[in-house]
Amino acid sequence: MTEWLLSHFATSPDWFGYLPILLQGVNITLQITAYGLLLGLVIALSLTWILERRIPVLAQVTEGYLLLLTGTPLLVQIFLIYYGPAQFDWIKSSWAWTYLREPMFCAILALGMNAGAYTCRLFKGALEAVPKGETLACQALGMSRGQTLNVKCRHAMRRVIPAYSNEVVLVLKGSSLASTISIMEIMGLAQRINGQTYDTLAVFGLAGAIYLILNGLLTWIFRLLETRALQFQAQQ
């Protein structure tokens, strides 16, 4: 099987020309991933704060949000955000339509909302994993609820890095779904090339290799962060 794959790439006259084209989509992929992660982080921190403080009504709304976003496919969410608003004339005549008609904005919004829900689950689980003795110690020292939450967050963030690195990788891979709404990132360019050449194995093989390299770099970076966090914790 390996020999057949190598012979296919070796005999294909154009496969080496696909790579520069696919690399043009890396910048778009990284932009979608970065902005999606940033939006997701803001959403996750806000929702985690609401759940931790147990704010009436808002906590119930947050739980519903988490259930909806983690219980439905990301592709469905992208379609609803991109195609859904066009069904309402009042949205098309509002200022929001300036943004909602843009595929890039909708892809980032969908990824951010989805990542925010999953990241909130990670943060909430990390906070609940903090030993209760630390919370009791903060209360014994007369700290306020906000100060106690700050102490818990500092300890929880060191534990959440490995799990959050997995979420970052998932967001990067999820960005490939942006191609379904005509965004020319890596997968969008791969689909266009494949439609023109029908060289499916070479085109999507190269696209997969690019994603593999990007995910490998992200995993390496987060392992360094995790090592630094553990070293810092050991020094305390």
Image: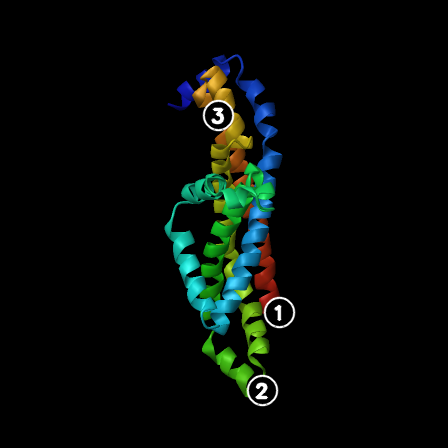
Looking at marks 1 and 3 on the same chain, the residue that comes earlier in the sequence is marked by 3
The image shows residue 235 at horizontal and vertical percentages of: 62, 69
- Residue visible at 51% across and 79% down in the picture: 135
Identify the secondary structure beneath mark 3. Answer: helix
Identify the secondary structure beneath mark 1. Answer: helix
| Residue in front for this viewpoint, 176 or 83 | 83
Q: Which mark is residue 142?
A: 2
Image quarter of the N terminus: top left
- Residue visible at 38% across and 48% down in the picture: 72
Residue 158 seen from this side: no
Tell me the CA gap for discs 1 and 3.
50 Å
- Badge 1: few (under 14), some or many (20 or more) residues near its Cα, within 10 Å? few
Q: Which mark is residue 166?
A: none
Which image quarter: residue 189? top right
**Mark closer to the observer (2, 3):** 3
Q: Which residue is identified by label 3?
A: 191
**Mark closer to the observer (2, 1):** 2
Q: Which residue is identified by label 1?
A: 235
Q: Amino acid at mark 1?
A: Gln
- Residue visible at 37% across and 52% down in the picture: 71
The image shows residue 208 at horizontal and vertical percentages of: 48, 32
Q: Amino acid at mark 3?
A: Gln
